[in-house]
Image (cartoon, grey):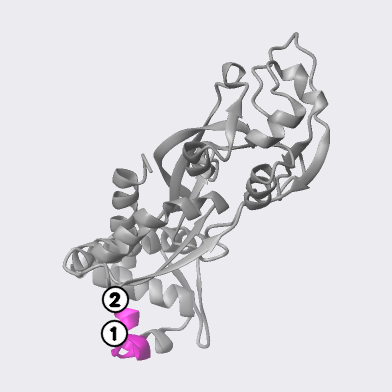
Amino acid sequence: MDNLGALSVFVRAGETRSFTATGRHLGISASAVSKAIVRLEERLGVRLFHRSTRTVSLTPEGALFLERCRRILCEVEAAEAELLQTQSAPRGKLRISLPSVGTLFMPKLATFKRLFPDIELDLDYSDRLVDVIEEGFDAVIRTGDPSDSRLMARRLGSCRRVIVGAPGYFSRAGIPVEPADLTNHACLLYRFPTTGKLDAWPLGRTADMPAIELPVSMVTNTLDPQVCFAEQGLGIACLPEIAVHQQLQLGSLVSVLDDYNHESMVFHVLWPSSRQLSPKIRVFVDFIVENLFPL
């Protein structure tokens, strides 16, 4: 612990470049700071500071040692914080980003809220690729493979994408029995907000199969208009099955071309990587992994 105290004095002096300011912050004299630094230099066998009558500055060895000491002290602080957090109940604001299809998760999130009433949920629905850290989210639920090395991730589950339309639409336009038949149908397409590219429908294409150019009836960058237009009999849409599972059960939408459609969407929960995980994030991640799927 004496060594940690000396490191704390050194780090503060290295950051302020002033023994006087360091002493004022730590509640000791500038002379005591100077003596602590001298003892540290003697133990290490290296000079950490250049000293003059007016200023102090780090030597190259001191600058290198400063970065390492910062990490050591951060680890100590993190260990202390983890122990304190194990004794505290999950509470505070929990800012979560979900895709628009995440409205179907509401019953599960309501259960979470009942279990942890002291956690204030702040829910943001968006199909764009949010920057979790820069935008201040505690966690996000997204599809696809995690690619941000700054984030931790756990798999939640998967669901198919289905090509659907209303029974009335198919009675007028006919039922497509193979992908090529889609060229004669009104297609309700999705455009990715981040890239501007149109979503490619899962039609079991192989390398030797020509791409099918889908006739565009409507383009949107969120799922709700696709679901609405499809239910209104205005065309065919390709949607996550969880977005239309109720409509499929009720028969207001029916799926087609299932034999050509074998792709699935994989959902993950992601949160910023850090040395300690706050109780509110820990209980949310554990709950959502264990309970979100099946819906």
The residue located at (69%, 30%) in the rendering is: 170
Q: Is residue 34 magenta?
A: yes
Find out whether the residues at labels 2 and 1 contact each other: C-beta distance under 8 Å: yes
SS type, badge 1: helix
Q: Residue 59 at x, y = what percent? A: 50, 65
Check disc 1 and report the residue beneath it. 32
The residue located at (72%, 19%) in the rendering is: 179
Q: Nearer the viewer, residue 172 or 192?
A: 172
Q: Residue 150 at x, y = what percent? A: 50, 50
Question: As drawn, is 268 to the left or to the right of 111?
Answer: right
Q: Is residue 42 visible?
A: no
Quadrant containing the C terminus in the rendered view: top left
Q: Residue 199 at x, y = what percent? A: 71, 36
> Which image quarter: residue 196?
top right
Highlighted range, magenta: 23-35
**Quick one: label 2, few (<14), some, or many (20+) residues within 10 Å?**
some
Is 103 placed above or below 47 here?
above
Is 108 placed above or below 25 here?
above
Is 97 placed above or below 23 here?
above
SS type, badge 2: helix
Residue 36: mark in rendering: 2
Q: Residue 128 at x, y = what percent? A: 64, 53
Kind of residue sitting beneath label 2: Ala
> Which image quarter: residue 2?
bottom left
**Quick one: label 1, few (<14), some, or many (20+) residues within 10 Å?**
some
Question: As drawn, is 124 to the left or to the right of 187?
Answer: left
The kind of secondary structure the magenta stretch mainly shows is helix
The residue located at (80%, 29%) in the rendering is: 214
Compute the Cα span from label 2 to label 1: 6 Å
Residue 62: mark in rendering: none
